[in-house]
Image (tube, rainbow, N blue to C red):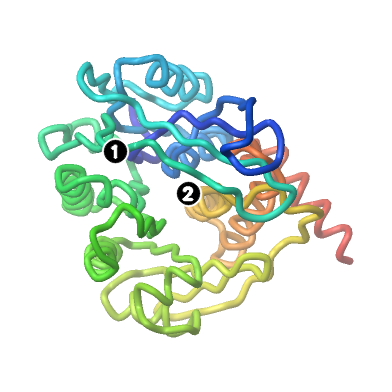
Amino acid sequence: MSFDVLTFGEAMAMFIADQTGELDRVTHFTRGLAGAETNVAVGLSRLGYKVGWVSKVGNDSFGRFIIETLKAEGVDTSHVQMDPYNPTGFLLKSKVESGDPQVEYFRKGSAASKLGSEDVVPDYFSRASHLHMTGIPPALSTTARDFSKNVLCLMKSMQRTVSFDPNLRPQLWNSEKEMIQVINEFAMQADIVLPGISEGEILTGYTQPRDIAAFYLDQGVKLVVVKLGSEGAYYRTEKEEEMVPGYRVERVIDTVGAGDGFAVGIISGILDGLSLTEIVSRANAIGALAVMSPGDMDGLPTRDELESFMQDQRTNTR
């Protein structure tokens, strides 16, 4: 079986509070699935692409839940290992009326953090046209960082395209200096880099999207798209650049997962052969849909839902 896209990383069980308020006062939660890379995998699968996800989960209820959920979404999990010694991580997420929720992670020593270079299966990765990765696996452990490096080098050696979302998680790193150094090492080997504006400032020291993009283009990256929230996104290549406006959002329910939805738009747009403006516009649209739903994956659209949303927005802005 061949794949359009492969990705890898940590998935966790997620418990979303049923009522608003501080997490220590909430008594009822609804279970879901969390993980930046699984969000991208599911988003691409819903748009009709063949996608595989590689990881380790615990041989426990949470691990089985993750695998079954992804299978139901059409994501290939044939290279997800069940670890009998280390657990699947989980997180608690508050319910908010708008904006950023409170999130508490329970992931230290998780099965996914035990990924290592010995877990790279070249034959499996060779079946994919594109690799999507984030800065989270390299932050989990030194062995997971080695796994990430090996996969990246393997895909580059086979002339596959690579997209990279920094997805900064400062709490997982020993220091900001180490985080910046390692994340940039990965970013500079990718074809496509997708930083948020605040991430770009941290990683490059520049405050303007154009300068952030230039920082990576100068290192050989082919396309940089800087996410600017509700304003939209700015893209730049060696030959062209443009600010692409965002979509109107009626109500922001939960911002978690918006960047992953954005990545789905970029990758799918490239696979579909769209123009750069169309690609970034699609990414903005999926990011907008993501923030209007409470769960990390709930707002990720099917192709019909995406086209309907974009058409409605075009009609309403005429």
Q: Amino acid at mark 1?
A: Lys
* Residue 235 can be seen in this image: yes
Look at mark 1 in the image and give the residue it sits on: 108
Tell me what residue is drawn at x 61 percent, y 76 percent. Answer: 243
Dividing the picture into quadrants, the one containing residue 18 is top right
* Residue 296 can be seen in this image: no
* Disc on res. 60: none
Furthest-front residue in this view: 25
Assign the C terminus to one quadrant of the image.
Answer: bottom right
The spot of residue 280 in percent (x, y) is 58, 62
Left or right: residue 176 versus residue 103 is: left
Q: Amino acid at mark 2?
A: Leu
Left or right: residue 264 versus residue 135 is: right
Tell me what residue is drawn at x 23 percent, y 21 percent. Answer: 83
Q: CA distance from mark 1 to mark 2?
A: 36 Å
Look at mark 2 in the image and give the residue it sits on: 271
Dividing the picture into quadrants, the one containing residue 19 is top right
- Residue 57 vertical placement versus 209 (above, below): above
Badge 1 element? loop
Assign the N terminus to one quadrant of the image.
Answer: top left
Tell me what residue is drawn at x 46 percent, y 36 percent. Answer: 91
- Ranked by sequence position, the earlier of labels 1 and 2 is 1
The spot of residue 84 in percent (x, y) is 22, 16
The spot of residue 34 in percent (x, y) is 48, 36
Query: Is disc 1 surrounded by few (<14), some (14 to 19) or many (20+) residues within 10 Å?
Result: some
Badge 2 element? helix
Query: Is disc 2 surrounded by few (<14), some (14 to 19) or many (20+) residues within 10 Å?
Result: some
Furthest-left residue in this view: 118
